[in-house]
Amino acid sequence: MPEPAVLPPSATARAGRASAAVLAPALALALLPALLAAPARAEETAAPSVRCQVTDPRLAELSGLVDVGERMLAIPDGGDQVSVAVLDGGCQVVDVTTAPLDPYDPEDLGVGADGTVWLADTGDNNATRATVALIALRPDGGTALYRLTYPDGPHDAEALLVAPDGTPYIVTKEVLGASHVYRPAAPLVDGGTVALADVGTVTFTLTGTPGGPVGRAGQLLVTGGAVARDGSRIALRTYTDAYVWPLAGSDVPAALAGEPVRVALPDAPQGEAVSFTADGGALLVAGEGLPGDVTLVPVPAGTAAPATPASTAAGPSGLLDGGDDGTPPLAAGLLAATVATLLVWLAGRLRRRRSAGQPPAA
């Protein structure tokens, strides 16, 4: 029998509904700092272009992507065994690598400098998991399972950053836009459990970029991460935008503390994957749904966005100005946070029920 990647505690539907109802007012208040902050200024880039379309039903819920040159690696969200698809330049599946491990909710993919493929089994829509996991597929065919615990309770996370020195960083998906950055606090132990350390926070703000399944709240939710092959830059994406930081050495927390370049992404129903191209000159983004575009998004030449002048930062009067639909952005953000909380909870419930009803893989 495959070893389960995590051991989530049981949670009743009644408890989940109560949590969502209790959290909504608190989320609305806690969202204020994110709404008051000015978003990173978007940089002008060349127009995005579709590289190819994913049509294979095994990748209907594509959540992680890495460009490795003439091929791309991709993982689906879910399943009862580790599965990494190898895609050609036309997005056709030419090979699948599997491992006898039963993941709970794999969300992102990374490749280390030594060729190890890392899967982040960190999805937790209901915030109930006692442990999350990193799964390593080594070039020699070996596998390893590393369980991890958060120091402050469960989080949902969909972004993995594998630093050039091999250190994995997990970036959480927060409805309020304040994503935590965690790394292992001790050497990883195959089959064992290691604590994570909170090493920073990245705050995302409303940008106005359309896209995603949860309205404006999608502009705050981190759904994927990437490290350039040459180690020069890192990226995080939300449902609507990508953020790029320069990286010096392997100090990911220091990089994320800087000012990013923001790139508005093409409107997509549920964009979750991001990768630098093999030459580091652009991003590739993709997501759930078939047919699903793998889109090439050029990255600006600069690696840091200019600081937003104080005179243009959002002030009291700006919070009352209406958006494109006439809704004040403050009210829209509060509503978005509440709606997103409920939608994320419902999505988690549906996903777990659907997974439970699937027959074992052949």
Image (cartoon, rainbow, N blue to C red):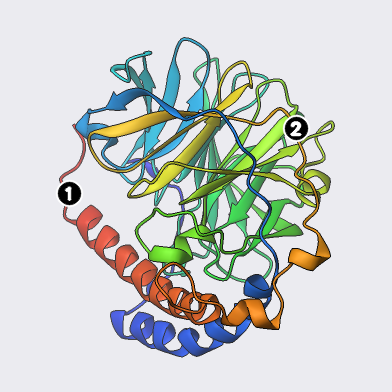
Tell which of 310 and 131 is nearer to you: 310
Q: Identify the residue at horizontal 46%, vertical 90% (top origin).
A: 22
What is the crowding at mark 1: few (fewer than 14 residues within 10 Å), some, or many (at least 20)?
A: few
Location of the N terminus (image quadrant): top left
Q: Return the mark for residue 358.
A: 1
Q: According to the image, label 2 marks what residue?
A: 302
Report the amino acid beneath label 1.
Gln
Report, in whole angstroms, how far the alpha carbon at label 2 lies from the one at label 1: 47 Å
What is the crowding at mark 2: few (fewer than 14 residues within 10 Å), some, or many (at least 20)?
A: few
Q: In the displayed structure, does residue 81 sit left or right of residue 199? A: left
Residue 168 placement (x, y as % from top left): 67, 41
Q: Nearer the viewer, mark 2 or mark 1?
A: 2
- In the figure, 181 relative to 70: above or below? below
Location of the C terminus (image quadrant): top left
Q: Return the mark for residue 53.
A: none
Residue 356 placement (x, y as % from top left): 22, 56
Report the amino acid beneath label 2.
Gly
Q: Identify the residue at horizontal 68%, vertical 21% (top origin).
A: 113
Q: Identify the residue at horizontal 23%, vertical 37% (top origin).
A: 290
Q: Identify the residue at horizontal 46%, vertical 60% (top origin).
A: 218
